Amino acid sequence: MKSLGSRVFGPTVLAAWIGLAGCAQDPPRPSQPAVAQTRVYVANESSNSVTVVDAESLEVIATIDAKNHATHDLALSRDGRFLLATNLAPGRLSVIDTAGLETVASVYTGARAHVVAFTNDERQAWVANIAEDNVSILDVRTLRIVGTLPTGKGPTGLAFSRDGRYAYVSNQGDKTVAVVDTVTHAVVKRIPVGTNPHFLTLGPDGRVWGCNTGSNDIYVIDPGTQQVVASFQVGPAPQQIAFGFRGLLGPLAYVTVAGFNKVLVLDADAKRLRLLEEIDVGDAPNGIAANPQGTRMFVVHERSNDLRVIDTGTSRVIATVPVGRKPIRVVVSK
Amino acid sequence: MTRATRGARLIALVLLVLPAAAFAQSIAAGTARNAVGVLVVVRTDGVEISLRGRGAVRVFEGDTLKMEGKGKALIEIDEGTHLALNGDSVVQILSRWEKEQGVTRVVRMQRGEVWAKIGDARRGLEIETPVGVLAARSAEVNVRLVSDNEAVATVVTGVGEFSTPFASCELRAGTTSFGQRSQACTPPAATDIRTVVGWSRPLLP
């Protein structure tokens, strides 16, 4: 049976390969190393769209209609070819072709589809459905839901360990992070965390970092012990975390603290979490993501409806780009 | 009736019908035709409507279909595809949209057993369970959810693809595959089709 996913992405992928084959006989000698365009994608929850920004020029390339409602979280494939977007209202996942800058599929995953993450091999995408207390497993090739895992009450965050052996699912309803063995699909541990745990991020140290939006702190889970090895009070309504460098200093953890309208900069060494700096940003910062070099932080603000760019070398906001209404999540191509 | 009167009536009819069509929220997905026992159709807003015996209850995208007690029901979904529910089945009627392929009908099982005959070769049907999904077109299939951790997929006629998070198994007519949580689907094995789908026969028109 021909796969549906391959039909969706087939022509684009094929065209790329044909293009490469055409160059094979007489390879060009570029005067400069090839640099792929780095893009920033922003999920606008109240505009039902994704804003696409050139990470260098900071110009808006496109605004993509998600063909759904309440677009919340994003996951970008490593090659940047396709972007997945959750949509809270219909419980559906939008599949976006980043070359064509359009939504090419919409898949029902579950009620209040909240966050999405690719597995490390990118053969599957897992989607946490808040109102169903489970995670849907999407086969990326066929775009079929091939399984559903009960994970805990109100799943709102999702990240995979560096080796892909475990998935971490934060559950707002029971204030835990469930550790799911990706081989047995069993929840092997429930780690108590704080109130309203939300997005999870894999840190540069291989640990899993998360924010307790309701108890004003962040926490760090060590996959070796499956325990919280550090936590730190950052202020009201911390939202998301990204990692970068300030010159020789780093890696550093950049935390959006919505209640302070600040990004807090912490030493990302979990053994000695300490506040280094506070950066004033816009109104209600939420999503944050770094460029691949870790020298820029892209921060979206759900009340001022913009994307602000922090130069990590000077810790200053160097640009503000208007995006859609209530931007929640931002991802950057690798 | 004068030509002018006919025209005015036509315009009035269009004005009456147009807003309903333009603002329609629910997408029709089929019609429940027959229930042995009681079939309850639960709309996405929680409104319920029941079918007892023969009838015509419309089914919309997102509806949940529940058998009350131990019954059976037949639903015509889309064109030429029939779906039957057995026992205490609970299913949700969903879809996937793809730019190139249009809409694929999806039935998500929460409990019980379903049988389907997919008549339109252009449009497939997918039956989801917590442990795997059976996809087929121009085929007759049966899926039984043993528990949240185990499902049995059978192809009666035609060909189907049973996929779990760990593997895909192509099922030909007269074969069955098991899906269990954390395991690949079992290789297709021959089965007695009459035993598997006998329950659905009294429902067929």
Image: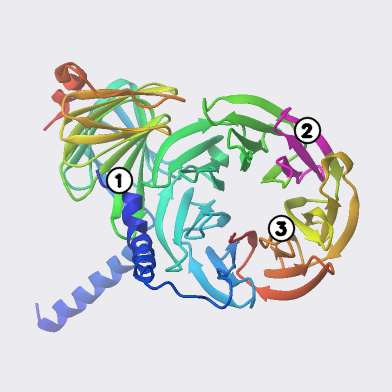
Cα distance between the residues tagged 1 and 2: 43 Å
Q: Is residue B39 left or right of residue A269?
A: left
Same chain? Circles 3 and 1 = no
Q: Is residue A237 above or below residue B85?
A: below
Same chain? Circles 3 and 2 = yes
What's the chain of the residue with tag 3?
A
| Residue in view at x 35 percent, y 70 percent | A25
Q: Earlier in the sequence, mark 3 or mark 2?
A: 2
Q: Which residue is mark 1?
A: B105
Q: Is residue B199 above or below residue A244?
A: above
Q: Which residue is mark 3?
A: A286
- The percent coordinates of residue A57 (x first, y second) are 64, 78
- The percent coordinates of residue B147 (x first, y second) are 41, 20
Q: Secondary structure at mark 3?
A: strand
What's the chain of the residue with tag 1?
B
Q: Which of the 4 image quadrants contains residue A28?
A: bottom left
Q: Which quadrant would the N terminus of chain B be assigned to in this image?
A: bottom left
User: For the residue carrying disc 3, how many other residues have a C-alpha within 10 Å: few (<14), some (14-19), or many (20+)?
Assistant: many
Q: Is residue A175 left or right of residue A325?
A: right
Cα distance between the residues tagged 3 and 1: 36 Å
- Say whether residue A219 is magenta: yes
- The percent coordinates of residue A138 (x first, y second) are 44, 42
| Residue in view at x 43 percent, y 72 percent | A27
Asked if the residue under mark 2 is in contact with the one under mark 1, i.e. CB atoms within 8 Å, the reply is no
Query: For the residue marked with disc 1, what is the amino acid?
Result: Arg
Query: For the residue marked with disc 2, what is the amino acid?
Result: Val
Asked if the residue under mark 2 is in contact with the one under mark 3, i.e. CB atoms within 8 Å, the reply is no
Q: Which stretch did the figure color magenta?
A: A205-230
Q: Secondary structure at mark 1?
A: strand
Q: Secondary structure at mark 2?
A: strand
Q: Which residue is mark 2?
A: A228
Q: Is residue B159 above or below residue A326?
A: above
